[in-house]
Amino acid sequence: MKIIECPLNGPRNAQEFVCGGEARQEPSQDAAIDDWADFVFLENNLKGVVHEWWCHVASNYWFIVTRSTATEEIIATCRPDEFFADRNATDGAGRE
Amino acid sequence: MPLALLKYGFRRKYRGERYIPAPMPLRKAYDIVIIGGGGHGLACAYYLARNWGITDVAVLEKGWLASGNTARNTAIIRSNYLTPEGALFYEESMRLWRSLAGELDINLMYSERGHLTLAHTDAAIRSSRWRAEVNKHLGIDSELVGRAELAKLCPQINLSEDVRYPVLGALYHPPGAIARHDAVAWGYARGAMRRGVEIHQQTEVTGIHSHPGGSIELETNRGSITAGRVVQAVAGMSSEVARMVGVKLPIRSVPLQACVSEPLKAFLDPIVVSGSLHVYVSQSARGELVMGGATDPYPLYSTRSTLDFTEGLMANMLELFPFLENAKVLRQWAGIADMTPDFSPVMGKTPVSNYYIDAGWGTWGFKATPVCGSCMAELAATGSVPDLIRSFELERFGRMQQLGERGAASVGH
Ligand SMILES: Cc1cc2nc3c(=O)[nH]c(=O)nc-3n(C[C@H](O)[C@H](O)[C@H](O)COP(=O)(O)OP(=O)(O)OC[C@H]3O[C@@H](n4cnc5c(N)ncnc54)[C@H](O)[C@@H]3O)c2cc1C
């Protein structure tokens, strides 16, 4: 993965980006402390296809990357609103 | 010894020492099963047998002994950590290291070189002084040195000011050492096998079920077995294996790369580390420079090497040692580091009874091999958590508590 297709800036060198970790939906404000601890600290850390937040540093633009942590292949990138709309449609709350 | 060596030299046939376990059938049940035949798992097996007389133990290793991070690290051993919990734990490891070669009867090439952590900014000087004071208070040999003293301790370092990050001083830790990492694994393996522990290579755990009665069933590529208690010590694969038993960890698996130069005439005695430049370098007994840097920028389960890493590392190496500009890199590799958010390990109980975890060793776990093996053995043998590792329990994250270890390797400061 040398080139990442940024939804805002098009194909850019991977070194221009930082990985922001798993894309998950925040617990509700009144969720139990266990849910918050899980959200803040615990990771699925899957070996396989994952959805992550990435940021194009120069333009400070955050978006979603779908990639394989087993093969280092980038499968797709999309805007966050597309991603979460999709998830909410398929699995209700979009939570894991 | 010299006479024995001479006789050995004149012998026709050299008897090979057997460190690698011969294949043998897997039994149906064991008292304790250790998943992962790296240094940590093997040390735990050894101390179970030696300290607790428990030998109904099997170590299951999916590849070969020490095929994970144990034989991929840059082998730096030190105890000048920042948190009292960490510093005391690693100091106990140093105590065990010093007598380990004799105890295991194997040449670990444990070599106390002195360890220098360079500071390039006022902030780094401040945190070095902080570490030195915490260390001294705990009886650990550690001090802050200025440029003049640094020039005496390691005249090879470029102390000129016409570089991007001039060196202002260093945290000096005289007992800092390196060791032959694969020999550590072999020594523990042989010690454990001699006491009756079984070590199974090419045996991968593929599924785990905990039974209401307390026993744990492990599926492997060689059939399923039952264990009274299980210790998981699989480093980079921690999250994947823990998932099999329904435990979620605060870990990201990120590649950490390293490389060695061609052998050079011995010139570098101390181990030199720069947290700001992300350079870790020592010279092995063979003359190779063993070099490491920062972890890769994103999680990944592939141990591929990248040119980005070598290029970035060498740019910084040449700031510190400009005369190496014509030296060649000989080999490069990667291991998968199990990184925690607070740079402290996760050791102890899990929500699953009789299932113990030894993980989150990231870029810093080789030095902990002896003390971690001994503490995990105590936990598996007695069921109660030794004081030395109490603050490293997985539970801390549930309480929103971290044990921020900024003295760990690969942590920028
Ligand atoms: C490049 C690099 C440099 C480092 N430098 C240092 C350093 O200078 N100082 C320091 O203190 N630490 C350092 N570390 C960290 C250190 O190497 C590790 O923390 C330590 O070796 C972990 O030991 P371990 O026995 O837990 O893991 P490993 O040695 O990785 O052993 C885990 C074993 O589990 C096996 N396994 C995995 N999944 C399964 C399964 N399902 N079934 C059966 N077996 C399985 C693997 O094959 C592996 O052999 C470095 C790491 C790297 C990668």
Image (cartoon, rainbow, N blue to C red):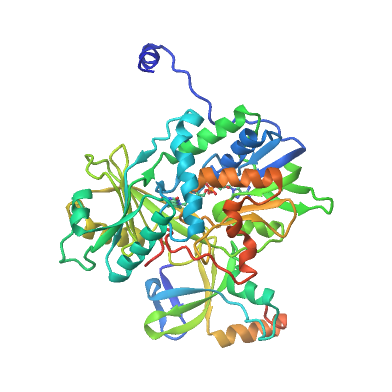
- Front residue (pair B167, B65): B167
Give x and y (percent) for residue B90: 48, 50
Q: Is residue B207 left or right of residue B267?
A: right
Residue B180 visible here: yes
Quadrant that contains the N terminus of chain B: top left
Say above or below: B1 vs B181. Answer: above
Horizontal arrangement in the rendering, residue B214 relative to residue B81 (left or right): right
Q: Residue furthest right?
A: B213
User: Could you tell me which residue is drawn at 81 percent across and 52 percent down?
Assistant: B211
Q: Tell me where residue B286 sits by quadrant.
A: top left
What is the quadrant of residue B5 in the picture?
Answer: top left
Position of residue B129 in the picture relative to residue B106 (left or right): left
B295 vs A37, nearest the viewer: A37
Q: Nearer the viewer, residue B150 or B234?
A: B150
Q: Position of residue B370 (x, y in %)?
A: 52, 42
Question: Which residue is rendered at x = 73% and y = 47% of the image?
Answer: B218
| Location of residue B132 in the rendering, given as x and y in whole percent from the top left corner | 36, 58
x 67%, y 81%: residue: A94
Q: Is residue B17 above or below residue B214?
A: above
Observer able to see residue B35: no
> What number of labels is visible?
0
The C terminus of chain B - image quarter: bottom left
Residue located at (71% from left, 41% from top): B32
Q: Position of residue B316 (x, y in %)?
A: 27, 61
